[in-house]
Amino acid sequence: MFSLGSSHRYLLYRQPCDMRKSFDALSGIVSQELNRSAISGEVFIFLNKRRTHLKMLHWENGGFVLYYKRLEKGTFTPPVLEHDEAISWPDLVLMIEGIQVQKSIRKLRFSLEKNSVFS
């Protein structure tokens, strides 16, 4: 089934990517340049130099899925991230929809990843 959601981890490749690349070449970038496993279940995001094309590579049971969006007008504006920080689901949706938040305040929320109470 084709589905992405808030339960996935989204990682942005920070260099411009040739959008002619497909499954094998993109998974090669993931393993060689990002030092990650392409079959980890994480979603890897690639943008072209002009940021008008976006590809997302994701491993699902049985094989890779490649999501591709080409804008007819405008550009994708990726969120500002720390060194190896993942893109959150809300930030990914805003980026794909072309919504740029000028000022926002993120309220604290409980997260199992950030709290070691259950470790």
Image (cartoon, rainbow, N blue to C red):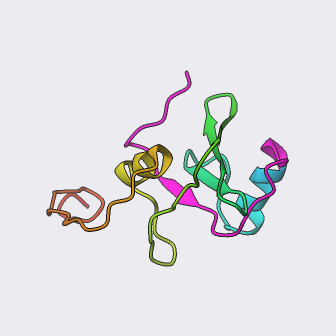
| Residue in view at x 65 percent, y 41 percent | 72
- Residue that protrudes farthest toward the bottom in the picture: 83
Q: Quadrant of the N terminus?
A: top right
What percent of the width, then of the height, locates residue 47? Answer: 66, 56
| Residue in view at x 61 percent, y 53 percent | 45
Quarter holding residue 46: bottom right
- Drawn side of residue 42 relative to residue 46, left or right: left
| Residue in view at x 32 percent, y 60 percent | 101
- Residue 4 within the segment the image draws in magenta: yes
What percent of the width, then of the height, locates residue 31? Answer: 73, 61
Question: From the viewer's perspective, is residue 29 above or below residue 20?
Answer: below
What percent of the width, then of the height, locates residue 77? Answer: 51, 60
Question: From the viewer's perspective, is residue 81 above or below residue 20?
Answer: below
Quarter holding residue 64: top right
- Drawn side of residue 101 relative to residue 22, left or right: left
What percent of the width, then of the height, locates residue 11? Answer: 54, 59
Q: Which residues are magenta?
A: 1-24
- Residue that protrudes farthest toward the front in the picture: 73
| Residue in view at x 72 percent, y 58 percent | 48
- Residue 65 within the segment the image draws in magenta: no
Q: Quadrant of the C terminus?
A: bottom left
- Drawn side of residue 73 relative to residue 15, left or right: left
Q: Main secondary structure of the magenta part?
A: loop
Instruction: Tell which of 31 and 2 is nearer to you.
Output: 2
Instruction: Tell which of 73 and 28 is nearer to you.
Output: 73
